[in-house]
Amino acid sequence: MSRHSWPSPTAPYARPVTSSNDEILRLASADNFRDVAGPGYATHDGARVRRGVFYRSNELQLTESDHGAIADLGLRAICDLRSQGEIDHHPDAAIPGATWMNFDVSGIPMDEVAGLRDRRSAIDLMDRVYRSFVDDARARSEFGGLFRQLATGGPQLFHCSAGKDRTGWVAALLLHISGVDDPTIESDYLLTNALTAGSRARVEAEIAKALGAEHVEAFEPTLIVDIEYLRSGYEAVTTRYGDRATYLRDGLGLDDTTVATLRALLRDES
């Protein structure tokens, strides 16, 4: 996998936000950062998902305080799912002790977004993005590489640009591997919309200013997550592989040992 030189953090200063009991870290400058385990989701067989192993985020354009908060996690690796163009435009802040790795998965094609004029076309585009996670050979190869890297052990962080689609797909699969049920996975996936409401409102204001308020509705489906998108990916899995276990094995090339290792890392059976 390719490597990219680290820049120095340059974002404006802000303080991280945490829950009242300080157990769940929230970052002001990476609003979709969170622990994949959530609060320690229950699995269908009575275990819990172990916190502090895998983290997910949007791009790491970090304030000084948030940079320190992430550095304190002791991350071994930062796994960046963005394209080289996305990386060049917004390179990650360097995290001491963490090796940066790139697993290049195509996200939303921005040239097509620019031409959107109605909401249905935007939803169809997002459905196609999620199906590509299953149908595109390069995406499968890169996702497979990412999962093999995660199986080397935590703590690790993976992310894309907004932390919602490529990152959301990986997080959903990790929770599935750990034994979390689909309603919980879907609820966790939809947290993106709540966590990023403020930054999304700013983007929508910019769209309205640049193109007119009537364009916000057409663009909005590309700025959120929707269960329809996730289920489009699942439907592609069913069509091509039959189930997610076979997608992981035959699509992503993960052998039984790798999947079992991920499952053991993710689960707290105590």
Image (cartoon, rainbow, N blue to C red):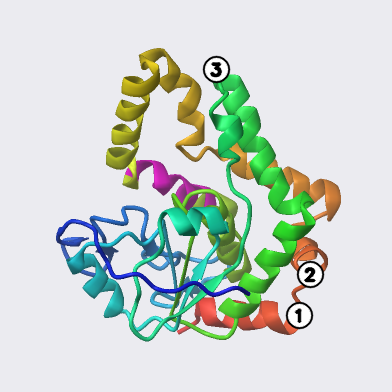
Q: Is residue 190 above or below residue 244?
A: above
| Residue at numbered disc 1 | 256
Lower position in the chain sequence, tag 1 or tag 3: 3
| Residue at numbered disc 3 | 117
Q: Tell me the CA gap for discs 1 and 2.
A: 7 Å
- Say what secondary structure mark 2 lies in: helix
Mark 2 residue type: Arg
Q: Is residue 119 above or below residue 36?
A: above
* 193 in magenta: yes
Q: Is there CB contact under 8 Å for labels 2 and 3?
A: no
Would you say 256 lies left or right of 10 here?
A: right
Residue 44 at least partly seen: no
Quadrant of image for the N terminus: bottom right
Question: Magenta span covers which residues?
Answer: 185-194
Mark 3 residue type: Arg
Q: Which mark is residue 249?
A: 2
